[in-house]
Amino acid sequence: MTCIKISGWLPAMVASFAFLSACKDPGPSDLMTLPAPMDLVLVYQEDETAGACLLFSWSPVDGASHYYVSLDNAESGSRVAEVESVTETGVLFQGVEGGVTYLCRVRAVNGYEYSGFAVSDNIFVPAPPEPEEPEEPENPGTDPDNPEPDTDPDDTETPETPEPEPGEPGQEEPEIPETSENQKNASLI
């Protein structure tokens, strides 16, 4: 089975080749003598190393020496990848982009003879799941990655200092009421 790896630069490069290939006249229509491939199957599968993959297969056509296969974006109609000469009856497209609907086209070829295109059903490749955000701990300061409690300096309360008992150090002497001049003189006598 032919394996095609899709990468960031490939779709743009393949699109330009596909445009040039589409502009080529395959020849007179009387050379379209081969029957189109049948029993088309387009399957999505997930691979741990290759990511999202599409497996496209069909039944062999008598008289075909090879097949022309393309992978297209079904929504925009743009060509994602193409293989001009596949000798097997299947192609694996690895690393396709998620969140896109695809379809495949295949035609049988033998020298200057060829078939019309057979087109697969559309298949949607789901987008990869978004990475989950870590949950915040319920009690700030109990997270092993963040041992410091989350406190706002404006929210802290200053503990009140208790009043010292009379006679304890740090307490001021009680005030003595002022006396008149006569009272002072009277106490001196």
Image (cartoon, helix red, strand yellow):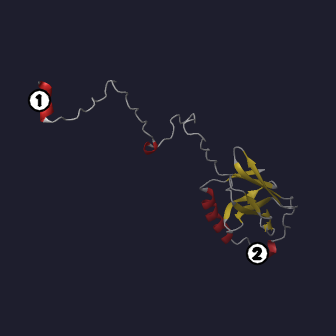
Quarter-of-image position of residue 162: top left
- Relative depth, front residue between 65 and 169: 169
- Residue 185 lies, with reference to residue 55, above or below; the image says above
Secondary element type, mark 1: helix
Between marks 2 and 1 in the image, the one whose residue lies nearer the viewer? 1
Q: CA distance from mark 2 to mark 1?
A: 142 Å
- The location of residue 57, given as percent across then percent down, is 82, 56
The dot on residue 185 is 1
Quarter-of-image position of residue 28: bottom right
- The location of residue 158, given as percent across then percent down, is 42, 38
- The location of residue 175, given as percent across then percent down, is 25, 33
**Which residue is rendered at x = 74% and y = 58% of the image?**
85
- The location of residue 116, given as percent across then percent down, is 80, 70
**Which residue is rendered at x = 77% and y = 67% of the image?**
112
10 Å neighbourhood of mark 2: few (<14), some, or many (≥20)? Answer: few
Please give the residue where the numbered disc 2 appears in the rendered image: 28
